[in-house]
Amino acid sequence: MIIPLEQINQETLTAIIEDFILREGTDYGAIDTSKADKIAQVKLQLQQGSAVIVYSELHESVNILPREQFNNEDKIHH
């Protein structure tokens, strides 16, 4: 289930993004990107709709996925 950004306060959103960055070990290329920059990049992707925040009832967890990946998983599971 996609969680709309407007339903998440900014502190919670930042915490979700920080957790995602740490968990995914996201690769930003050869350039060493600061944590604040990584958060800003993910937040921008969420605002643009290229990424979504997803709640999994099965795993009782929140994750950030590329919109295309969520759409593909939704088709597989339904």
Image (cartoon, grey):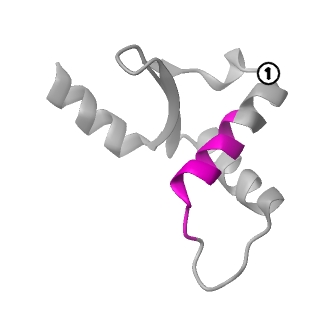
69, 48: nearer the viewer? 69
Q: Is residue 35 left or right of residue 70?
A: right
Where in the figure is residue 1, as x and y percent of width and height?
Answer: 42, 18
What x and y, as percent, mark residue 51?
51, 43
Q: Residues within 10 Å of mark 1 (few under 14, many from 20)?
A: few
- Per the picture, the main secondary structure of the magenta-coloured stretch is helix
Asked if residue 53 can be seen in this view, the reply is no
Residue 61: % across, % down: 49, 24
- Residue 73 to residue 48: above or below: above
- Residue 5 in sight: yes
Q: Looking at this view, is 28 or 2 the one in front? A: 28
Residue 54: percent from left, percent from top: 48, 27
Q: Residue at x 50, y 46 (%)?
A: 50
Which residue type carries mark 1? Asn
Residue at screen point 54% across, 40% down = 49
Q: Is residue 38 left or right of residue 59?
A: right
Q: Which residues are magenta?
A: 16-27
Is 77 magenta? The answer is no
Which one is nearer the viewer's eye here, 42 or 12? 12
Q: Nearer the viewer, residue 58 or 14?
A: 58
Q: What residue is rendered at 68% in x and 49% in y?
A: 44
Asked which secondary structure carries label 1, the reply is loop
Q: Which residue is mark 1?
A: 9
Q: Quadrant of the C terminus?
A: top left
Q: What is the number of callouts on the image?
A: 1
Say whether residue 17 is magenta.
yes
Residue 21 vertical position relative to residue 77 in the rendered view, above or below: below
